[in-house]
Amino acid sequence: MIFENLQLAFAEIANIKTLLLMIVGVGAGLLAGAIPGFTIAMAVVLTLPFTFSMPPEQGLAMMISVLVGGLSGGLMSGILTGIPGTPSSVATTFDGFPMARKGDPGFALGLGVWSSFCGGMISAAMLVLFAPQLARVGLEFQPWDFFMLVIFALTVTASLAGKDLIKGLIAGALGLLVRTVGEDEAVGMARFDFGIDSLLGGFDFIAVLIGLFAFSQLLSDVRDPVAARRSLTDRGNIRVRIEHWRAIKALAARWPTVLRSAFIGIFVGILPGAGGSIANILAYDQAKKASKHPEEFGTGVPEGIIAPETSNNAVEGGALTPLMALGIPGDVTAAIMLGALLIHDVVPSPSFISEEPVLAYSMFIAFFAANFIMLGMQSGMLRVFVLVTRIRMYMLAGVILGFASIGVFALNNVTFDVWTLFWFGIVGFLMRQFGFPLAPMILGVVLGNIAELNLARAVAISNDLTLFVTRPWSLFFLTIALFSAAFPYFQAASARGARWTWFYAPAMLVAAALPLAMMGGAVRPWLAGLCVVVGAFLGWKAMRRVKVA
Amino acid sequence: MTRVNRDTLCAIFLLLGCAVLAAASFEIREPDYGQLSPAAWPRLVVGILTLLSVIYLAQSIRKGVPEPTEGESSDETRRGGIAGFFVYWRNVFWCFALFLAYLLTMPYLGMLIGGLAFVFLLLNALGGWQPKQLALHAIIAVVTVGGMWALFTFGLHVLLPPGQILGRF
């Protein structure tokens, strides 16, 4: 059965049209990644309108290609010009640019390209292996658990996405609120329409996403008239040959760094709200700590390029895992992927892989294939990716705003969607100015319906609201959500040296052990026991620290 | 205006919005069927948002001068007064104003002509009005908007809105 599905999925991807679309997608992603100020999420969301007329396998393959290209595009400009194309490539410049300036740009680029490839492949392998297993666990979820899972995802995103938890939570709640406008899905009653007919259908959430993310980002990019008219760099005439063999040998010799960074990327990707921008810094930091010569970092050492580039490409496999297994996106780009699936009437859930095996396997294959295409294109089109950094931001902004309006209209052939783009562009811009993170709002918009539908299902099954806190999975997500909500305070207090922070991890482990023990089965009670033992040990160590202090 | 005022005003605006939405939630009709009222979820979200906004308001009053946020001015070139405010945000206002004009004129100009005009005018407003730039911006607008219009119309068979003035376009 698996072989049959794989064969069908392979046929969907390995045809000329899909492969051409994937090449275009990787190219577009690489270009977008190379341009500072043009985020990967913006590139993916702007690709969405093109895919609505395609079969889902083709559309998603193209979007995955844009994503994979975008994750790798930032390294070119980062290494050669010192300006990272995306926040995911910030740490790459720490050693990539010095190495290039020391006269070894070909080696630096080779390391970047092959690290990206390795990170992508490891992450794709993990996605294929892990997503079906997680989906099996997800089949245990009932509406109460799904509702709490959404709350957990929003809370984690709010606590990780910005400096201020309250602003993050407000953004998440605003996102949920946006989805309540229009007729409700359960009984079809009009809500918050204020007598305006266009509002009865609600806001198209793709238009909302493009407005919130792309429109508002472009406005922020052109705010400064001088910066908007300036080329990002004049270093457009660089001639470099990528040193592939030397880079492969260097990577093979540093495989622990590759593996560690890939797993950091995957783990960060699975966490809702955390993405490549966090993973690349974290992996760089860990590589530095693990090095025998940490003082050399920042001067152009290979590990300083390998770690961030491996991790930022590994992120997306992690982020797609909860999306494909549970229907809960791991980051903004995965949320946009969810939007693409919904456009094609595919609702991701724990049964997604078993009910839509060809589509699911197509996504897996596309992820692998996109990494190979990315490898080839990065090597062959190096100069183009450096040249695009000479584009002036105002030109890009003007063209993209025009394009966004056409793309958004094409989603439903309704002018109201273009108005939605406009209004949410303003909302997104104001939110950025007031310091509200947009990621929780976007997740709120995407997950709002899922939360409400599961709440309605839960209430329809039983009036007993205590089930939200007595069912094991529900309690588990609630516990983790509470601890993640406290995480920003923990971080701030930890920096001040507050003693209570020493008990944060032990308390979380012990608290998580209770729902795990309640789940029953063979493995989970043991896992609960392990959590209690580790928690007790850490608690004991914390007590000793308190006594010494 | 200080940061405290900005956050406080924002919190008050959010609270006012919550009040409007809370009142509007009582306009939602209750059907005789279904277990969960269609107003329950919106009220729950509005309730949570109100609570968070109250905390935000209290924080903004208590905090004093918070750290600057993304996009907020650390720009030394920013001048005070209403004129300074408009100069500082002029590019953003151009984008808003031209996009609004594009939307309002779409029924008359259509998406192709309106889109061309929007991109051309926006590029000039952001990039400059010198003759050489005008020519470059015109080429960019025609190639990009025209190309996109052609792709959607002929490639993806999407009927983009025509204008009353030129009929088909």
Image (spheres, helix red, strand yellow):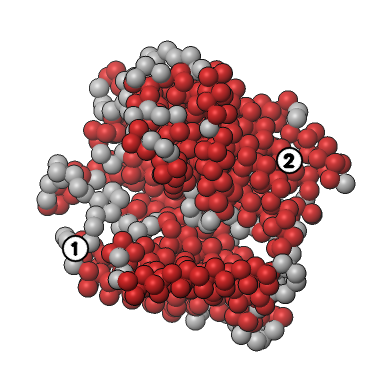
Letter of the chain that mark 2 sits on in the rendering: A
Q: What is the spatial separation of the Cα atoms under label 1 and label 2, in whole angstroms?
A: 52 Å
From what the image shows, is residue A544 above or below residue A72?
below
- On the question of residue B109 being in view, the answer is no
Q: Chain of mark 1?
A: B
* Residue B65 - label: 1
Give the percent coordinates (x, y) of residue A50.
60, 38
Of the residues shown, which amino acid type is indicated by label 2? Ser
Q: Which residue is denoted by mark 2 in the rendering?
A: A362
Above or below — where is A51 with respect to A471? above
Toward the viewer: A99 or A323?
A99
SS class of the residue under badge 1?
Answer: loop
Name the spot of residue A163 as percent of width and height, x first. Answer: 35, 59
Total labels: the figure holds: 2
Left or right placement of residue A99 versus residue A332 in this view: left
The residue type indicated by label 1 comes to Val
Pick the front one: B99 or A493: A493
Crowding near the residue tagged with mark 1, few <14, some 14–19, many ≥20 C-alpha atoms within 10 Å: few
Helix, strand or loop status at disc 2 = helix
